[in-house]
Image (cartoon, rainbow, N blue to C red):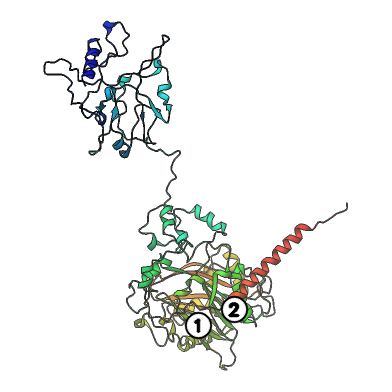
Amino acid sequence: FMAKQTCLKRMTENGEDIGLHQHYKTPDKGDSVTDSRPLKTSLVDVKPSKEHNDVPALTARNTEGEISPYQPRPPSLPRQSSKSGSVVEPVRNRRLRNSQESLSDPTETGSSTDSLKGDQTLPGLGGFAVNSTAPIRHQDSSVRSYSAVTTGSPVFRERGSSLSEYERRPHSQQSDPTDQRVRSAKVRLSPVHPMGPLPALEKSFVSATLRAANRIDRDCLDYATLAKENLGERLHRNLSDSRLLENMGSDSASVNSMRSNYSVLSPIRPQDVRNRYFLEGSVLGSGALLGAEELDRYFPDRRVGIYIITWNMQGERGLPANLDDLLLPTDSEFAQDFYIIGVQEGCPDRREWETRLQETLGPYYVMLYAASHGVLYLTVFVRRDLIWFCSEVEHATVTTRIISQIKTKGAVGIAFTFFGTSFLFITSHFTSGDAKVYERILDYNKIVEALALPKGLPDTNPYRSTPSDVTTRFDQVFWFGDFNFRLNKDRTGVETLMNIAGDGNMGPLLEHDQLCREMKDGSIFKGFLEAPIHFLPTYKFDIGCDIYDTTSKQRTPSYTDRILFRNRQTDDIKVVKYTSCSSIKTSDHRPVIGVFQVKLRPGRDNIPLGAGQFDRGLYLEGIRRRITRELKRREAMKSQSSSTICTIS
């Protein structure tokens, strides 16, 4: 210990200052001064290292102001090697323990908490340990971190045995060590900035992927194009699940997180499966299959699309080669939820007719029910994912002939409940003849009194029902068919008015219509409405052409085929389209098409459900025919592409 004191005293007498100012040599000794500027940091405290526990604590200055020989000197800068062969002073290198520390910048060295616990001291000259003298921002209270640049001088740093980029620079390019500020031991990364502009959030994300009820298929490219053109509008009432999307963020990540792992169906929690019940209760009851919650999931606007066709086929055996224009016209924006087809004087093979309908509609639809009365056919198709909300289907028939065995005139009705709304569809064929208006009124009165519906289905509003009128027992009623009402005007006058009404204004013609006159008088179809007519009369044409009757009878063109509707609540039925199909020319009648949007209401679970019943055999046959037709088409295209035609000039 005395030897060390003597060494320190001798160094002080030689002019080496070990005070708060850093000098490598004093100017009066003739040596070059490396740096005589005062340090910007000061020593806070000095503690002995573990290797020299016997050294007492040293003070910076004694009470008389003189420099104490016991004051330790901070580590000095390594002297640059010169041509004279001076040796660089040995400096104990500090090995950094944290792989996250920067080795290129002397001011950004730092360590984690764990590494600081094991490396808090910096060995200095004489074996004394010097703690950090710089205030550290956001410093942990339990661990006092320090900067590797305690004295402002760059020291050798290495990872392994290599020098840092800073020490490899020439001395002239190194920055002033005293100007280096002590920084935090923790690495502060620069904020991450996006490389490009973020994608804009659309007004509504792809809610169609959460829908199973009326989802547009990816092979229908025209639907996708239409969706891009009308982003600001709701394209269809069934394209979004508003109940499911209420608590979701407007980004695709939220949508994907709520999907099932295997499909795009709405996710179902196990707790919901446990609590699901089927009970008679309030229409607002939670968990009811036909209640408001389930209705809003499939129909946010609570409107269902219904496509109705009435056609007098004239008993022809041959069916049209293609029924696409009849069921799936190109001017329709979307396919509808229900397809109701009523036929008068139908073809002899009723099963063939139903199979052709299934083949045209394809695998998206199933035949919910079919009924007939002689040559009167009534068929109901529904989207296959909506059959679970349909009740059992009931039907009834009425004949208006005196001899009941002759079933060419009369009516057939089909009734069912969808959610909480009851439907009745009637197709009928009234007495023919220009002057037999009274007989047709009698046919109507007999049908409304004798049609025995509903049978087992509950009446959704018994207070507004009338026992003598079947049409008052249902919420929504559609009555269509060949009513045989004519125009009370000679053929020449009718043709003149038809030529004038080329712009679609059929008002002058309808002034002579027998049905319009009787409805205004209230003698028939009480409470029923009809959409405005903007098409030419549908009766009577020559087969295969657009020319009206050229036979000896010269029948007057008339609106015999009609579609009427009635509802219990005002404005429950909205007309979308009412027209005729002029491309079907296999009969003397043109089919009439009506497209409607019908208001739905939630129901109670006291309705006997159909449990998804449909005609499975017809469904499979329709799919088989579609496959066969597609294979034949591809084979024909292949043969055409492989054939060549040679011409000799």
Q: Is residue 394 left or right of residue 624?
A: left
Which of these two is toward me, 236 or 14? Answer: 14
Q: Residue furthest bottom?
A: 403
Q: Is residue 155 left or right of residue 319?
A: left
Kindly identify the residue that appears in the image at 43 percent across and 28 percent down.
161
The CA span between labels 2 and 1 is 23 Å
Task: Give the SS element for disc 1.
Answer: strand
Q: Amino acid at mark 2?
A: Gly
Residue 491 percent across, percent down from the top left: 62, 74
Label 1 Cα crowd, 10 Å radius (few <14 / some 14-19 / many 20+): many
Which of these two is toward me, 465 or 256? Answer: 256
Which of these two is toward me, 119 or 511? Answer: 119
Q: Which residue is mark 1?
A: 413
Mark number, residue 617: 2
Task: Give the SS element for disc 2.
Answer: helix
Up/down of 77 relative to 398, above or below = above
Q: Is residue 144 left or right of residue 273?
A: left
Q: Give the mark nearest the N terminus, 2 or 1.
A: 1
* Closer to the eye: label 2 or 1: 2
